[in-house]
Image (cartoon, grey):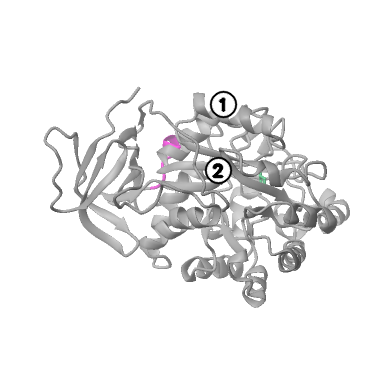
Amino acid sequence: MNQAQNLWLRGGQVVTPKGLEKADVWIQDGRVVGVGSQLSVPEGTPERDCSGLWVFPGLIDPQVHFREPGLTHKEDLESGSRAALAGGITAFMEMPNTNPMTTDPIALQDKLSRAEDHSVADYAFFLGATTDNADVLGDWEALPGCAGIKVFMGSSTGDLLVRDDATLERILRGGTRRVTVHSEDDYRLKQRYSDLAPKAQVTEHHHIRDIECAVLATRRLLDLVERTHRPVHILHVSTAEELALVRERDLGELVTLEATPNHLFLHAPDCYEQFGSYAQMNPPVRERRHQEALRRACADGLITCIGSDHAPHTKEEKAKPYPNSPSGIPGTQTILPLLLTAVRDGWLRIEDILRLSLQGPIQVYGVTDRGPLAPGVQGNVTLVDPRFQDPLPLEWLQSKTGWSPFAGRPMAGLPVTTILRGQVAYDQGHFHPTACEPIRFAAGH
Ligand code: DOR
């Protein structure tokens, strides 16, 4: 096990909420104690030359599917967390549609024990809402290691589903933490699948799960939020119409939004023509006008965070003919390289990466102990080499799936080293065993 928790990162450009600043970072006993150029670092502290590198705080991916237990031929906690760590993500929040589903404290504890043994990044797990557990989720949501409650309003991968408003209202009235929602209307989805999908191609995926499926569910959800005052977080928003609706309803902090890199960096119909079912996910990637609206909402702050929705499926599974090809795209490792291209291309600033991939998740879920590099926070750091301008190498990817629609796309920087509480946990393709821990959340958040 990696022991040293002290580290002096010298000569890099630190990514701060105000942009890049030339500064050293001093980590002592796993926490940042100083950021600046005149630090009184004790002699003998291990040093690392960061000249030419960008020094990010470790980022958080608040939406991944790592498939353990039950579906580990697609991914497991070790392979998924390796992908996260190599991509500069030091903590992840994992979704409950595993087998068994994470719908009670025993299943949650099972995941926490597995993660303690196998994860190479810090972790928390969502509890899935069902009609049966709707009234007890409020008691369980504060359990250590629980990221919160996840509701699927529309069916996606797996059997988790809460389709009706009455059950949703029970869930919303039953607790206090922000509830995380997959917002697609299951009544309309079922209708459209039975009417249209049997004869459809993957190129029509976004017409089958159409804009109305997303908007209907989001409108119902916003009505319920207005009635119950329970905060919600809408995952993987996919339509310009939902963004307009959220702005119009103006429910303030009660509603936060998440976007995936897939919706920001792919668009229909090109993605389906180029990648077929490898671009198929739920809610679907849509036309360019949605992509542009989502990009603007990331830049102007309407969207609070980026979650990868890392949703691995094997190539064999993806090769099944539509609609039996499963929905989902792996992506935790490619968040940061893609966001760096957004900075290069001018639609995000470097500090927006911090806001969307660290401060946003902290705010949405009430994460404690982590944040932009400043005295007191955990010494979690991601070093990025901005000189990397090559196509994204497929062999860099750690997911079991071995594919990504972004492999081969030219990048504008690559994470090269990831540090957990002052210990180098990943360095240029090599992993160094380092203790990981559950993410902690503020009480009552
Ligand atoms: O495309 C998706 N795949 N969307 C989801 O909501 C679930 C995910 C999965 O688990 O494969």
Residue 293 location, quadrant: bottom right
> Which amino acid, mark 1?
Ser
Location of residue 36 with respect to 120 vertically, above or below: below
Which of labels 1 and 2 is toward the front? 1
> Which amino acid, mark 2?
Met
Which residue is labeled 2 in the image? 93
Which residue is labeled 1 in the image? 113
Location of residue 417 with respect to 25 vertically, above or below: above
Q: In this view, does 322 lie to the left or right of 117?
A: right
Location of residue 295 with respect to 338 vertically, above or below: below
Is there any visible trace of residue 76 in the rendered image? no
Residue span colored magenta: 391-397
Where, quadrant-wise, is the N terminus in this rendering?
top left
Number of numbered discs present?
2
Q: Residues within 10 Å of mark 1 (few under 14, many from 20)?
A: few
Q: Residue 286: where, in percent of width, then height?
A: 64, 61
Q: Which of marks 1 and 2 is nearer the N terminus?
A: 2
Q: Quick one: SS at disc 1?
A: helix
Q: Quick one: SS at disc 2?
A: strand
Q: Residue 235: where, in percent of width, then height?
A: 62, 55
**Residue at position x 76%, y 41% in the image:** 324
